[in-house]
Image: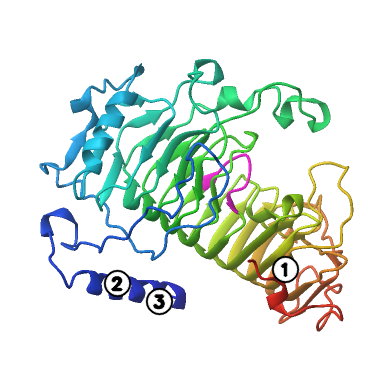
Amino acid sequence: MDLIRAFLVLWITVILFIHNMGNVEAARYHHSRKHKKVSSAPAETPDPQDPSPPSNSPTVPSDPYPYDPGNSTSDCVFDVRSFGAVGDGSADDTAAFRAAWKAACAVDSGVVLAPENYCFKITSTIFSGPCKPGLVFQVDGTLMPPDGPDSWPKADSRKQWLVFYRLDQMTFNGTGIIEGNGEQWWDLPCKPHRGPDGKTSPGPCDSPAMIRFFMSSNVEVSGLRIQNSPQFHMKFDGCEGVLINKLSISSPKLSPNTDGIHIENTKSVGIYDSMISNGDDCISIGPGCANVDIEGVTCGPSHGISIGSLGVHNSQACVSNLTVRNAIIKESDNGLRIKTWQGGTGSVAGLNFENIQMENVRNCIIIDQYYCLSKECLNQTSAVHVNDVSYRNIKGTYDVRTPPIHFACSDTVACTNITLSEVELFPHEGELLDDPFCWNAYGNQETLTIPPINCLRDGEPETVLEPSAYECT
């Protein structure tokens, strides 16, 4: 077991030991343990309909226990059929799910159960807390929204479908399918692939993110199959203590804006042993994220694992302490990408990419500090500082249409402390490209790189400031 996982296991063990010093209700959890309650109510009460990030987030992450499916006789299991759900794929089961949620929320270790062999349709819903600890939302059947924009209730938000808000120690799991019915949303005239040369056409463009956790702590999502989202499959905003494990996320390669997992203003995140294929970023890391551990993930086709974009509209953005290990990225437009806008401030620091297998990937390793969605972006002097980024044991094949290594750093705020070790990338088809691109990038090569990279500068730039100058406030 590597050092980080060993530390996490030791840390969780200590927390659980402390939490179990008091009374324990053995029938509630797998391990006959009960966590100490951590308040999930923030100092302010933001509107869960508002997708803007919160200014603060809960603290003290812990690992919530999942519901034991074998405990089917528990009086804390609230089958949605008992609340009037039909589960035929046509009837509106929203009211039944809301009633089951309300009942489960009021008891320790309550379980909202959507059983197998049923297809439940519900409209845009916010499942709110605070709730009693140990709440489980278990989907063993199929759960889906209305089919497309024309079927979407006019009174419902078109920005999101399922929202879990102000929760602590909650698990979303099961053996079932969360079906997004996204095809009609992807074909809205405003989508980039609809117009000539990638230009959009006028008209409504809001498309719902499929699953959103907002202002919540100590949450786990595991085992589910999540597919065909109208927009992002999963979003985590203003959360702390997130465990994502053994998910399957999929949508077609050309489905627009269908990021697999997106996190922002979220800390202490583990994403493990999951398969993601979609039409945009496999995993995207937005501003305000720290202590993120990603391991055993397979991406592709996708746009790779992306940090950013950061610093849009001259904003401040910080991302720190992120590790990606033992991952596969295949048939993707990008591999490991850091993208920032000119004019931003803040920093990206402490990123480690290790043991990554590339299979026919464009831009296998890329830092782009000139990110822009049009040709009208102006050059600006301020930038998000990229510092202390390591790439170790990155091997495989690349698409020869673009160089496999690309470091385009700000003219005025150089990228610093970039480390390359055992980077060996060969063309998937065609001839080896031996012209990796670097601009104002500083670092070192611990071993020779394939293809050779001679443009990385040694030492430190003359104008570099102390790291504290780039810290977020």
Q: Is residue 302 left or right of residue 112?
A: right
298 left or right of 392? left
| Amino acid on which the number 3 mark rests in the picture | Phe
Q: Position of residue 165 (x, y in %)?
A: 41, 44
What is the x, y in percent for residue 184? 58, 22
Residue at numbered disc 3: 7
Residue shown at 19%/50% (left/top)? 108
Report if residue 419 is visible in the image. Answer: no
| Quadrant the C terminus occupies | bottom right
Name which of mark 1 and mark 2 comes first in the sequence: 2
| Image quarter of the N terminus | bottom left
The number of callouts visible is 3
Left of 105 or right of it: where is 283?
right
Front-most of 415 and 449? Answer: 415
Determine the image quadrant of residue 397.
Answer: bottom right
Q: Secondary structure at mark 1?
A: strand
Q: CA distance from mark 1 to mark 2?
A: 34 Å
Pointer 3 local density, CA inside 10 Å: few below 14, some 14–19, many at least 20: few
Instruction: Kindly state the secondary structure of the residue where label 3 is placed.
Output: helix
Q: Residue at x 38, y 52 (%)?
A: 41
In the image, which is nearer the foreground, mark 3 or mark 1?
A: 1
Q: Amino acid at mark 1?
A: Val
- The residue under label 1 is 386
Q: Tell which circle, 3 or 2, labels the residue nearer the N-terminal end.
A: 3
- Residue, x 48% and y 40% (percent of image)? 47
Residue located 87% across and 81% down the image: 462
Q: Quadrant of residue 64?
A: bottom left
Q: Which residues are magenta?
A: 276-285
Residue indicated by mark 2: 15
Let me know if residue 443 appears in the view. yes
Specify the amino acid type for callout 2. Answer: Ile
